[in-house]
Image (cartoon, rainbow, N blue to C red):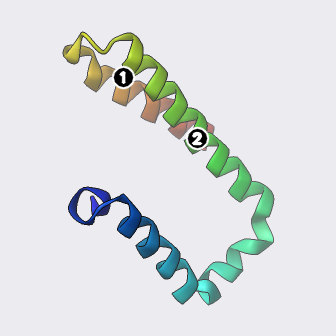
Amino acid sequence: MAAYSIGVAAAIVWVVAAVLVNRRRFAVFLRYKNYIRYIVATYILTAGLRLAVMRLFFQKPEMWPLIQLGSFAIQSCAL
C-alpha cells in the first residue's frame, strides 16, 4: 500500500526507519535466526511461484483468484 501511495523508494526508507526505531523489539527475534530464514525463504518461494504461475496464465484473469488462493495455501502449509 505504501509503495503505491508514496512510491517504492519512500516505502523502502519507511521500512528501514521502522526497523531502526524498533530494533529493541526485533532483538528478541535474533535468537531464532534459523526460523526467520525459514519464514523469509517461504515467502520468497511463494512469491516466485505466484509470479511464475501468473506469467503462465496472464491471459486468463479468471485464474488469478485461484492462483492467489493456491500460493497462500502453500505458504500456510509451510509455516
Q: Mark number for residue 2?
A: none
Task: Return the x and y of residue 75 as percentages of the image width and height.
Answer: 53, 37
Q: In this view, does 35 lie above or below 30?
A: above
Residue placed under numbered mark 1 in the picture = 67
Q: Who's the residue at 79% across and 56% down the image?
A: 34
> Of tags 1 and 2, which is closer to the observer?
2
Callout 2 environment at 10 Å: few (<14), some (14 to 19), or many (20+)?
Answer: few
Tell me the CA gap for discs 1 and 2: 16 Å
67 or 79, which is in the foreground? 67
Relative image position of residue 52 (x, y in whole percent): 48, 20
Residue 5's spot in the image, x, y percent?
21, 62
Asked if 22 appears above or below 49 in the picture, the reply is below
Q: Residue at x 45, y 27 (%)?
A: 51
Q: Is residue 21 above or below residue 78?
A: below
Secondary structure type for disc 2: helix
Total marks placed = 2
Sequence-earlier tag: 1 or 2: 2
Amino acid type, callout 1:
Ile
The residue tagged 2 is 44
Amino acid type at circle 2 is Ile
Q: Quadrant of the C terminus?
A: top right
Q: Give left or right: position of 38 versus 43.
A: right
